Amino acid sequence: MNSTPLPHPLTLVISLVAACSGAAALWTFFSLYSALPLRMDRVEKLNESQDARISEIQADNAQRREILAAALATLQQIDQRTKRIEDKLLK
């Protein structure tokens, strides 16, 4: 009878470990790949909420600019009146 010799037990162990490592790597890759759309949805929602917050801040800033412009105009009017009064008093 012609029989092939059995491989060394260490070779079998190494082959088993390599197969398990490959399977674990594939499992990890597909697990992460399948979770990617969920993460992208979270990122999109976060971006939308940040965009909304940025719009709110820009609106607040525009309103503050209008208030400051009105206050500046009032101060300039007061300054002009003060100068006129000073001029009248100094004459």
Image: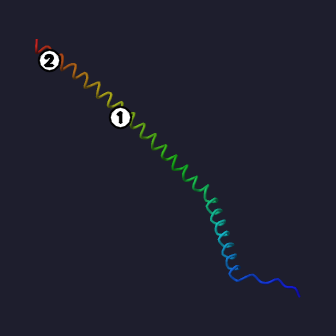
Q: Quadrant of residue 23?
A: bottom right
Q: Position of residue 3 (x, y in %)?
A: 84, 85
Q: Nearer the viewer, residue 27 or 71?
A: 27
What element does badge 1 sit on? helix
3 with respect to 48 (left or right): right
Circle 1: residue type: Arg
Q: Nearer the viewer, residue 46 or 17?
A: 17
Residue receiving disc 2: 86
Please report contact status of discs 1 and 2: CB closer than 8 Å, yes or no: no
Quadrant (top left, top right, bottom left, bottom right) of the C terminus: top left
Direction top: furthest residue: 91
Circle 2: residue type: Glu
Q: Earlier in the sequence, mark 1 or mark 2?
A: 1
Direction right: furthest residue: 1
Would you place residue 18 above or below residue 55 in this image?
Answer: below
Residue receiving disc 1: 64
Q: How packed is label 1: few (under 14 Cα within 10 Å), some, or many (20 or more)? A: few
